[in-house]
Amino acid sequence: MAGSSDGKPLHFNLFNNGSGHHEGAWRLPGSHPLANLDIEYHERMAQLAESVKFDSVFLADHVALDGAGYRPAGRLDPLTVLTAVARATRRIGLIATASTSYNEPFNLARRFASLDVISGGRAGWNIVTTAGDASARNFGLASQASHLERYQRADEFVAVVEKLWDSWEDDAVVADRERGVWADESKIHPIEHQNHFYAVRGPSNTPRSPQGHPVLVQAGSSEDGRDFAARHAEAVFTAQHTLADGQAFYADLKRRVKLAGRDPDEVKILPGIVPVIGSTEAQARELSGQLDRLVSAESGRNRVARQLGLDPALLPLDEPLPDHLPTVDDIEGDKSRFTLIVELARRERMTVRQLVERLGSGRGHRTFAGSPEQVADMIEEWAREGAADGFNIMPAALPSGFELFVEHVVPILRARRLIRSEYTGTTLREHYGLSRPRSRYAADGPAGER
Amino acid sequence: MAGSSDGKPLHFNLFNNGSGHHEGAWRLPGSHPLANLDIEYHERMAQLAESVKFDSVFLADHVALDGAGYRPAGRLDPLTVLTAVARATRRIGLIATASTSYNEPFNLARRFASLDVISGGRAGWNIVTTAGDASARNFGLASQASHLERYQRADEFVAVVEKLWDSWEDDAVVADRERGVWADESKIHPIEHQNHFYAVRGPSNTPRSPQGHPVLVQAGSSEDGRDFAARHAEAVFTAQHTLADGQAFYADLKRRVKLAGRDPDEVKILPGIVPVIGSTEAQARELSGQLDRLVSAESGRNRVARQLGLDPALLPLDEPLPDHLPTVDDIEGDKSRFTLIVELARRERMTVRQLVERLGSGRGHRTFAGSPEQVADMIEEWAREGAADGFNIMPAALPSGFELFVEHVVPILRARRLIRSEYTGTTLREHYGLSRPRSRYAADGPAGER
């Protein structure tokens, strides 16, 4: 089922977070601590990813500030950044994170359709629900909605957005100067949506975009998150720490997609990997150690404490995790990250300090320090063994880590036919091998959805 | 008080709406009916405006579709378009419309700060309140809020956004690799806003942008609108039909600005003009007639009926406006446009057909068909006679009308020193001669605002 096994190349996404995914990377000599605020840097990274035919670049987002003291924390609006990147590139897909918890579907539908028009069909939306009281307090609420309600709201939000994207049929605009008819209004449809969370009459005032629907991406791996992905997602980013975990997740999600009545091939699964690359394994491990030493144990401990819903004082650095922890049901934030951290610490009997060092270099994603051959071997193994349709590449240090990946790992992947050597399509949908949806309102649109 | 009287050049904004501000323009031979959806077109127009040192380009917006049949009606999200335009230009200001009625201040503050970063300090926000039940129904409401409540909400919305823009002091980011300190957290401030409409804790997670605050622009000329402009706006777009109206508006608004405790020079007033240019006056009038004939009287009548809050059946084309009309107090939509239309029709004793033809070529803005000399004379007169600090140029037909303006009118304006011949600054604030605000939270920030 995985991409490599049927001779098709894998899918590759660059997750550009500015200075790199290891928390210490911004402190390396020669780093660019303001990278995430530098639009020319974002353009250059996307151009580099495009030069080796990656499917897409991706930007995360948060809607609250979370500790700016010890690591790069300022960020720009992702969709705005990727609009600039769109005009500096020609083929690569552009995936922006936006929250269903604190936006209006009408506005977000238009913004993604606009990016899709501007980029010629390369827009993707990473759908997130926003956890945390700090975010809620930026939007008039005292505390966050429950995990379940956030996902229920997200379900309806996506349904509204998809209807708005369908509200102009592909051939609604006729622009007939002679007759003075700009659009065929019989092909523009109010959506008349009214349900639990939203009432939106429509139609959109942005015509249908090149992809019909920008590609829907999702990255939460909790039970609710997996079911949501099974219903909506076309690409899934996920943090999986071992091959066995990756295989289990892959099989489980594809099963859920099928149960939801969709074709499992229409959902591409891309585990995140945080490659720390050296020309030899020893050099990679040396860089890895250097990065770990640049993260203060206290700041890492504070982050883990937040993820586990604990007071940091309950986590002495040189002791294992306490026996009594909250259960996943108590966690209203990121449930899947909670589970991953607890299982990792228990399984490998780590002290808090060891846990912090391991997580510092990837926040739960698969960290891999090795030679270019070893990185390529790992990619090949995960794809061959049914854990991945592709990979979300999250270099520990940026830009250096991605430059090394492009220069040393990509040629190996290409020799093994694991990465495309030329784009065969022009849209993000075409890169990921996804079909283009018809408008549900068109005479030949999906049956029963009107 | 006007710009020209003290030897400083006037300010010029290009209002690019795609195919031109005359409703018939998209039907001219050689027109581009899809211009408003064409990003390369938007880039080219901005580059052309920049080549003659305009202060800014501006995009309007609506959040409901309003009759796509007989005129170009699809539009992209303005801030998204201008982000692409930012990377295709270097100096010109970029003013995007966004509504205070249907956005969250936290999101909008970040988006404009992001555009300001990406453009190197060239972002402006045209603040609008959104009228109309059609818009309300796209955002979960059965009908719009009252005119007054919309402005009250806008007041508080702008206050929240300004606090968020101030929440990072200019020197908050230190990026000290050695010490491992990315930001000085004592210079990043929660805003703790809580009032009638909004509760926003802050701080922003986007650092302070080059201009500190993107430039605030406003375009409503009702009583509520003028008071709002007096409190917040730094540039005002306005529709004034005669020199006398323009003078009265100019004097009134500057007076209100002073009453609000602000420096009248910190608010630039730019009436809209819709130039129809020919190499002779006769040619201009011929083009003007051609444009008028391309607008169907019925579609124009429907628009006027909507603006007046009437059933179109009450407006026979060859009779004057009925004696009994709603009063301005009944109008919950655009009050200033209502007043302008009624006064114009009464004063010039027009039939509905004549009114529609007059309005078709500018929707209430000053339409001017003439030779390049005549257009320049009018600009000079309005500025000299105290009706304008600059002009919002709204060519009847685009791109042709703006190309003619650049080729034939600008050289005359330049010879008379009415337009700058070189940019002297790099930011939109500098172009408009506006000071850069300090953060209210800085030790040397505005007193009493903490």
Image (tube, coloured by chain):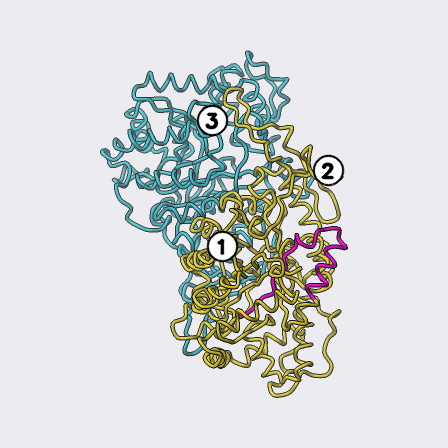
Chain colours: A cyan, B yellow
Residue closest to the eye, B355 or A163: B355
Find disc 3 in the rendering and name its residue: A26
Instruction: Name the side, left or right, on which B187 lies relative to A229.
Output: right
Cα separation, mark 3 vs mark 1, equals 39 Å
Q: Is residue A189 visible?
A: yes
Q: Chain of mark 2?
A: B
Residue bearing the label numbered 1: A162
Count of marks, rendered view: 3
- The magenta segment is B249-274
Return the x and y of residue A12 as percentages of the image width and height. Answer: 35, 38
Bin the neighbour count of mark 1 within 10 Å (Cα to Cα): few under 14, some 14-19, many 20 and up: some
Label 1, secondary structure: give it.
helix
Three-letter code, disc 1:
Glu
Q: Is residue B351 above or below residue B247?
A: below
Q: Label 3's element? A: helix
Q: Spatial distance from mark 2 to mark 3, Cα to Cα?
A: 33 Å
> Nearer the viewer's eye, disc 3 or disc 1?
3
Viewer-nearest residue: A159 or B401: B401
Q: State which quadrant residue B322 falls in.
A: bottom right
Mark 2 residue crowding within 10 angstroms, few (<14) / some (14–19) / many (20+):
few
Q: Is residue A329 above or below residue A177?
A: above
Q: Residue B266 lies in magenta, yes or no? A: yes
Q: Position of residue A392 (x, y in %)?
A: 40, 35
Question: Where the C terminus of chain B falls, by quadrant?
Answer: top right
The dot on residue B26 is: none
Above or below, comparing residue A149 to residue B144 in the picture = above
Give percent across and percent down for residue B219: 63, 61
Q: Which residue is mark 2?
A: B450
Residue A325 magenta: no
Task: State which quarter of the image contains the N terminus of chain B.
Answer: bottom right
